[in-house]
Image: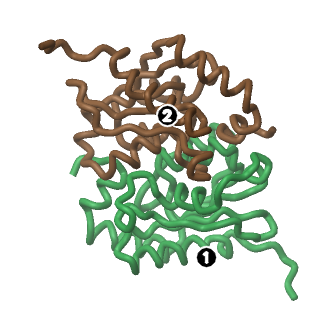
Chain colours: A brown, B green
Amino acid sequence: MNDAPPTDADLLAHAVAEARAGLAEGGIPIGAALVQADGTVLGTGRNRRVQMESATRHGETDCLENVGRLPAGVYAASTMVTTLSPCDMCTGAILLYGIPRVVIGENRNFVGGEDYLRSRGVEVVVLDDPECIDFMGGFIRDHPSLWNEDIGVED
Amino acid sequence: MNDAPPTDADLLAHAVAEARAGLAEGGIPIGAALVQADGTVLGTGRNRRVQMESATRHGETDCLENVGRLPAGVYAASTMVTTLSPCDMCTGAILLYGIPRVVIGENRNFVGGEDYLRSRGVEVVVLDDPECIDFMGGFIRDHPSLWNEDIGVED
């Protein structure tokens, strides 16, 4: 039995599993998980632009939707884990719910609202995870138009 | 035949209709519409926290989801119309898609990311509409816990 709290790398594994599931579905491989300090996973999600023809189901927002309605105090004791630096929408969703800590797999393929999160008092940890860098980079190379659509960039 | 472009008040009417539909469903009365300069309505939406047990379907995000996947250039030629000042999540969604103009019914009952939108180059117009102020204020008075949940505030 191991009572040690989970490491950030342990937490990231939940988000990576979602990203890999998305990739297997033909989707954009970005995953997320909302976890508590003791490692309890409140829920997970993944980008579903392709799978649901969705303009708002990014990794973090899909996660929040899957977790469902929660009282503010639960968000305030949680960490959002995501495989990729959060876009403006997901940054805003984290701020809306007062989630105080964000663990990011990588920000080499995309840098989102990290500075804004920090300016609003959120702790941001970037793991620079080679696996996340690899599958996201590969996806962007293979599907540039889909990726541009997902981040609102003219193709 | 009237070829004059629609006024901002004309545009707001689409969002107000959604908010009133939400109120009739027992939902939080916030509505939104994504419109083009000539008045063409790309789609509308309303807060569906109650109706769909959703943590991410605010007025603006529900609107963007209903509109569906669009190329960046369409967002860039659109205006987001909303009955209430947009929360952080909806502010971020507007920024993600590069929507250059936001028309807001009122900001007396809640002030969201207006300054941040302006700092990122978005034109923000606040109409201070008495009807929007009235139905939102009434809802908050009657359902304070639900409203606090919607904006991530401890009850």
Quadrant assignment, res A103: top left
Say which residue appears at 56% left-offset and 65% top-offset. Answer: B32
Res. A121 visible in picture: no
Whether discs 1 and 2 lie on one chain: the answer is no
x, y percent for residue B152: 33, 47
Q: Chain of mark 1?
A: B
Q: Secondary structure at mark 1?
A: helix
x, y percent for residue A34: 34, 34
Which residue reaches farthest front? A24
Type of the residue with mark 1: Ala
Q: Which mark is residue A142?
A: none
Residue denoted by label 2: A21
Residue B68 vertical placement versus A136 (above, below): below
Residue denoted by label 1: B13
Residue A130 vertical placement versus A80 (above, below): above
- How many numbered marks are there? 2
Q: Secondary structure at mark 2?
A: helix
x, y percent for residue B41: 71, 69
Q: Chain of mark 2?
A: A
Q: Nearer the viewer, residue A83 or A86?
A: A83
Left or right placement of residue A36 versus residue B61 in this view:
left
